[in-house]
Image: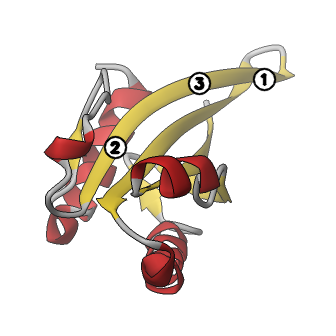
Amino acid sequence: MSQMLAIARAVTEELADCDAELEFFPEFDLRDLEARRVVVVPSGTEYRALARNTREELPTVQIGVLQRATEDDLPGLLLFTEQLGLRFLNRRFCGALCAGVAYDPIYSPEHLRERGQFVSVIELSFRMVR
């Protein structure tokens, strides 16, 4: 199994209290969002040569947070999202250290304004040396 997929599964298990789901094609309709939805998606891997026989592997996993919302809900949802991502910083999953947490976007103003939908993407960056 790919390391990226193994990490994505471990992240999904860690988020069991949020009913997180591992998805490969995360497409949702607003009517599917009666409750908050947390989705984990394996997103990519970068390899860097450190020496002739040593490489650094940098897998990334994205966590999507989706929920019907209004502007009044934004402060609580932003706090939830920020805390969700920071749960992973400096923790190890499948032998990889979570070295970075990025929120891109922390939320989509267009989705909130036009669709009444809170959409946030958290990107976890991991580091492994092999």
Where is mark 1, residue-wise? 48
Answer with mark 2 or mark 3, whichever residue precedes in sequence.
2
Q: Residue at x 38, y 35 (%)?
A: 41
Q: Nearer the viewer, mark 2 or mark 3?
A: 2
Q: Nearer the viewer, mark 1 or mark 2?
A: 2
* Amino acid at dot 2: Val
**In the drawing, what numbered circle is on residue 40?**
2
* Amino acid at dot 1: Arg
Q: Is residue 20 left or right of residue 70?
A: left
User: Can you give x and y, in whole percent of width and height, for residue 106 in the image?
Assistant: 62, 60
CA gap, disc 2 and disc 3: 15 Å
Please identify the quarter of the rendering in which residue 19 is found: bottom left
Where is mark 3, residue-wise? 45
Please identify the quarter of the rendering in which residue 65 is found: bottom left
Label 2 crowd bin: few (<14), some (14–19), many (20+), radius 10 Å = many
Q: Residue at x 58, y 58 (%)?
A: 107
Q: Is residue 17 left or right of residue 100?
A: left
Please identify the quarter of the rendering in which residue 109 is found: bottom right
Quadrant location of the C terminus?
top right
Q: Nearer the viewer, residue 56 or 118?
A: 118
Quadrant location of the N terminus?
top left
Q: Residue at x 25, y 35 (%)?
A: 29
Answer with mark 1 or mark 2, whichever residue precedes in sequence.
2
